[in-house]
Amino acid sequence: MVSVVMATYNGEKYVKAQLESILRQSRKPDEIIINDDDSIDNTVNIIEILKCSSDIAIDIQINKVRLGYAKNFRQAIGRCHGDIVFLSDQDDVWHEKKIENCINVFENYDDILALSTGYYLADDMLRKKKASDSYKEGRLIKISWEKFIRHPKYPGMAMAFKKKIWSDIDAMDWKFNAAHDWMINQYAAEKGGMYYLSDKLVLYRQHGANTTGVIINQRRQDMHKNRLKLINELIDAFKSISPNLDKVNYINNMILFQTVRKKLLMERRLFKLLAYEFSKIKYISVKSIIGDMYVCLKSGRGRHVHHWSNHSYL
């Protein structure tokens, strides 16, 4: 049984296109579970109209109290019944063979616990801008725990996982507000079951209202704040897991590294930040370092880098 889980909030502009792309799949899901986080626009009405004409079960629950993105997904995942669970954002569009291609991989490789796929960055009108990677279609890559921790670049909107691992993940310490997709991938990677399929199976729509998004598509005044928020989420995620004894020191060092990284980024001390990151390269990828540099340069208000620490980051 295949479940699609979607979390919605004020998504009236895009949710119809995303749901229709799921309903058009060559391999249909058995159910679509939707948690709406108390939207105040027409999102729920749009879903209800599609539900009436769908031959696939659509179960929508409306939260009485707003939970936020990660908690909303967590609750929705808990309500689904499928053996394989696909995560869906409200504003993207799926390739018609997304479910089919992923299910074929799960069926052929028993050790896969979580599978991320490639995607295309797209603008508001779904015009393709850039591929998530340069790999040829059909390549399957195992992602080690160390690789994922160092650069967790696998968004939930392009992943699926086996529901059997959810009870262990759900039982973890979520009080630090860790992201649901990070928790799933981290667990799968730690168990040796995280994989990446290079097929580009999602149009990842970039627009001003994205909950998450690529740095270059963010407004200048937002990118610095969002970068700090991302680092805070990483720190929270590290605090939420209970790694094997041989990984405890690595996790503690990673928390320390991210804490110092956040402080230097917050103060916009670019040269010191870069020197620190390159001296701790085993805790961060070069792409992440370039991203930090880009944020500092594009969001800085001062003329000289060493004066940026005098300015507010909000």
Image (cartoon, grey):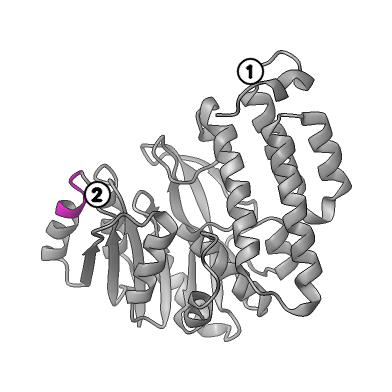
Q: Quadrant of residue 293?
A: top right
Residue that appears at 88% across and 46% down: 279
Type of secondary structure dominating the magenta stretch: helix
Label 1 sits on residue: 301
Q: How much space separates mark 1 and mark 2, taking CA atoms?
A: 35 Å
Q: Is residue 267 left or right of residue 209?
A: right
Quadrant position of the N terminus in the picture: bottom left
Q: Are marks 1 and 2 in contact (CB under 8 Å)?
A: no
The percent coordinates of residue 3 (x first, y second) are 35, 74
Q: Secondary structure at mark 1?
A: loop
Q: Residue farthest to the right?
A: 279
Residue 99 is one of the magenta-drawn residues: no
Mark 1 closeness class: few <14, some 14–19, many ≥20 residues within 10 Å: some
Residue that appears at 45% across and 40% down: 206
The percent coordinates of residue 261 (x first, y second) are 74, 43
Amino acid type assigned to the residue bearing label 2 in the image: Ser
Is residue 25 shown to the viewer in this render? yes
Q: Is residue 82 left or right of residue 299?
A: left
Marker count (numbered): 2
Judge whether 12 appears above or below 247 on screen. Answer: above
Residue that appears at 83% across and 56% down: 282
The percent coordinates of residue 267 (x first, y second) are 70, 30
Residue that appears at 16% across and 67% down: 54
Q: 313 or 160, which is in the foreground?
A: 313
* Disc number placed over residue 39 in the picture, else none: 2
Q: Secondary structure at mark 2?
A: loop
Q: Which residues are magenta?
A: 41-45
